[in-house]
């Protein structure tokens, strides 16, 4: 599906001209010289655009509909994927996919938010916003992984937990809180990757990892720019201003020094331009951190996870 952001359009137009010249090029009419010039111009323009993105533009990239989602990463990174459904209490939540797979032959559990690309799929996946049963399903899979001594990989990409009346009636806050508590005490490695949007508690409910990574153009914040703008200025049009204030990009979060462990580089122009390459980059970091964590005992994993989140909060007392 072709979808382009506003700031990508000059580059898309240039690439379209290159494509047209290639189609018109024949043995009798050679446009190779013009094509080479345009390709160099396009490469320079791409570097200029993506080296000067605002926080709002990075937020838009994180939400790009062609960006790889959890099932895409599963297809590119893992083998023998077997999806598990349902929370054994209410129903299955398609906004979260979970199951078991192998990473280079090693069994593991994989859990992540799943968005949709067309209207039908977006509605089916509830725009990647889980209900309580989604979080309970995720926790069920994590506890099964613990029982069998399997590492857990989570992929975060959600604007937040679903705020509907039904979700609240079924215990949305309790489900998130329970996940935070239970994941903190898992005796197996938990590795989290923010692949797109990391929205508040809806993200954190599957993101209490021993290692937490962000992809280069992902975002992570306590609230969306639109929500922040609505609260502060009662004006959703000020979302770009809110994004700047929130400092929600991977680079901003990395500067805090204690929230994430790595920023995973993406192909120039974003992961949607080359999903297989983006997935290979993610896989390299997953294997790196898994190798390090496998050296720790169950008790050491719990303590490391506890200390990681303990140091994120600083309290200042003023007389």
Image (cartoon, rainbow, N blue to C red):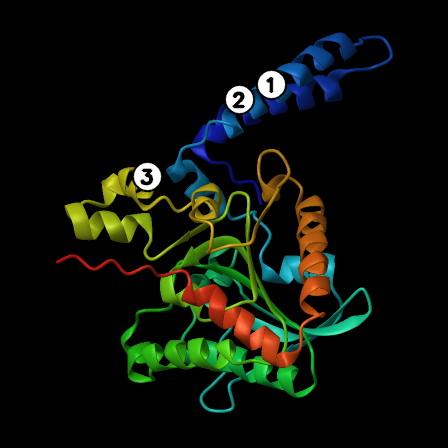
Q: In x, y percent, where is residue 147?
A: 65, 88
Which residue occupies the foreground of this view, 195 or 84? 195
Which of the 4 image quadrants contains residue 240?
A: top left
* Mark 3 vs mark 1: in front: 3
Residue at the image position 82 percent from the left and 15 percent from the top: 26
| Left or right, 107 with reference to 238 | right
In contact (CB < 8 Å): disc 2 and disc 1:
yes
Q: Name the residue under label 1.
A: 44
Q: How crowded is mark 3: few (under 14 residues within 10 Å), some or many (20 or more)?
A: some
Q: How far apart are marks 3 and 1 (CA)?
A: 26 Å
Q: Is residue 195 visible?
A: yes
Say if 195 sits above or below 251 in the image: below
Q: Classify residue 190 as left or right of residue 247.
A: right
Q: Mark 3 points at which residue?
A: 244
What secondary structure is found at the residue carrying circle 3?
helix
Q: Distance between the residues labelled 2 and 3?
A: 20 Å
Find numbered disc 2 in the image and state the secondary structure of the residue it sits on: helix
Q: In which quarter of the image is the C terminus?
A: bottom left
Which residue was labeled with disc 2? Answer: 48
Sequence order check: which comes first, mark 2 or mark 3?
Answer: 2
């Amino acid at each position: 599906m072709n979808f382009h952001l506003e700031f990508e359009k000059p580059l898309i137009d240039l690439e379209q001209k290159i494509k047209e010249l290639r189609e018109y090029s024949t043995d009798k009419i050679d446009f190779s010289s013009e094509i080479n010039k345009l390709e160099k111009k396009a490469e320079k323009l791409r570097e200029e655009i993506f080296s000067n993105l605002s926080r709002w533009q990075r937020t838009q990239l994180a939400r790009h509909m062609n960006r790889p989602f959890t099932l895409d990463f599963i297809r590119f990174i893992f083998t023998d994927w077997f999806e598990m459904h349902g929370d054994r209490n209410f129903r299955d939540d398609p906004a979260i996919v979970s199951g078991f797979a192998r990473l280079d032959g090693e069994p593991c559990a994989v859990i992540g938010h799943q968005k949709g690309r067309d209207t039908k799929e977006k509605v089916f996946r509830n725009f990647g916003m889980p209900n309580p049963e989604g979080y309970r399903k995720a926790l069920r899979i994590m506890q099964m992984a613990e029982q069998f001594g399997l590492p857990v990989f989570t992929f975060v990409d959600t604007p937040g937990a679903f705020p509907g009346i039904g979700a609240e009636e079924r215990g949305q806050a309790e489900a998130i809180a329970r996940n935070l508590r239970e994941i903190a005490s898992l005796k197996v490695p938990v590795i989290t990757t923010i692949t797109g949007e990391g929205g508040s508690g809806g993200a954190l409910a599957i993101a209490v990892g021993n290692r937490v990574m962000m992809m280069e153009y992902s975002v992570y914040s306590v609230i969306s720019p639109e929500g922040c703008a609505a609260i502060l200025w009662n004006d959703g049009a000020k979302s770009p201003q809110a994004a700047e204030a929130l400092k929600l990009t991977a680079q901003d979060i990395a500067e805090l020094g204690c929230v994430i462990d790595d920023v995973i580089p993406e192909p120039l122009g974003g992961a949607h331009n080359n999903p297989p390459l983006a997935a290979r980059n993610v896989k390299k970091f997953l294997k790196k951190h898994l190798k390090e964590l496998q050296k720790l005992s169950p008790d050491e994993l719990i303590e490391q996870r506890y200390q990681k989140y303990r140091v994120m909060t600083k309290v200042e007392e003023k007389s």
